[in-house]
Amino acid sequence: MLRWPVLAAVTLGIALNPAEGKAQEIEAVFAIPAQTLTFSAHFVAHDMGFFQKEGLKVTDRYLVGVNSPNAVLQGGADFTVGTGPVFLRAAAQGQKFLAIANLVDKPLVELVLRKDVADAAGISDKTPVAERAKALKGKTIAIQGVGSIVHAWQRYVTMTIGGLDVEKDVRIAPMDPPAMFPALENKAVDGFTTSMPFTTQAILKGSAVMVASSTFDAPDLQPFGYALVYTRPDFCKEKRDLCQRVVRAYQGAAKAIQEKPDEVFEKVLTKRLAKTPPDLLAAAWKVAQTAHAKDIKVTVAQLENSQKINLGTKLIEPKDVVTNYQELFTDEFVK
């Protein structure tokens, strides 16, 4: 069992729905960690009809952080979309999944510091990133889910970039992303780490300074497994047609993101993230769109770079590292 909080199993089968007079739909349940731009391709597959085109009836369960892979493990979901570091830590603990696609091949998590705190530390967005990271000493940083990629990035910035003691020098405060900006403005926290558009909001409003963006400040982590689509190891042997349809739907979504980013923004993202001001969402999408994969095939290089996060943050011991990446993914469904 993963050494994380495990959700109770939900009995859920994948079955055909023989609606009279209609083509049969294949049901699939996805565990999605959050409603952020990281999962844009999944939202596009829903809202632009790519799942429907493949005869899929997809249900989403929103489960924060490692609760999503735990749901897949326990049978409460068939697939999840998650990051390489979490995927590889599970494998190191003996809980191996199978990745069938990667929707985002650049990391998209960021860490921001409240403007008055940054000013007091004498840093700005022009300060070298290592010096910005050192300013985290003694600060309280909100994170989204212990053990998540957000938590891992906070540790990576603190330890690997800033050279600080992650256990002693920085405090963390787990909370959901929508609560982070209010907590920042109320001075309940000094900064926060999460994905866009929440970090974008703090920057554009002048409330925070960027400490480190994984998209721009960590070129050694690219290509990256940031949105791996994965399931249980034997699931695609038993449900090969379902896995093929899921990947085809995601290929359609990936193509739409590359070729029709404005249409994706208008038809999908403005509705999915309706509480986010349009100008803020547009600014975040301008960055996030470039991080989405043109080719959604999983590669060894993506997993190797994902493992750097685990090792660099001491979330995994070198002796526990999985070295045979080939058994953790397949590209047979990506044509």
Image (cartoon, rainbow, N blue to C red):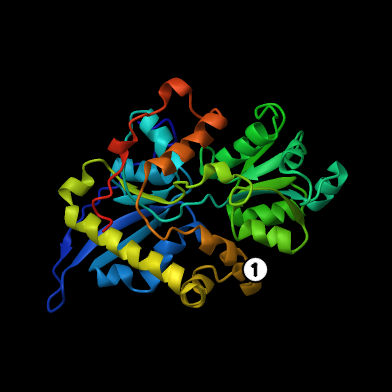
Question: Label 1: which residue?
Answer: 280
* Disc 1 residue type (three-letter): Leu
Q: In which quadrant will I find the N terminus?
A: top left
Residue 263, above or below 166: below
- Residue 144 placement (x, y as % from top left): 57, 46
Residue 294 placement, left or right of 200: left
- Residue 320 placement (x, y as % from top left): 42, 23
* Between 113 and 301, the one nearer to me in the picture: 301
- Name the residue rendered at 69%, 35% in the picture: 171
Residue 307, above or below 35: above
- Name the residue rendered at 41%, 61% in the picture: 294
* Between 329 and 119, the one nearer to me in the picture: 329
- Name the residue rendered at 66%, 60% in the picture: 200
Q: Is residue 276 visible?
A: no
* Between 128 and 185, the one nearer to me in the picture: 128
Quadrant position of residue 204: bottom right
Residue 110 placement, left or right of 51: right
Quadrant position of residue 288: bottom right
- Residue 118 placement (x, y as % from top left): 81, 47
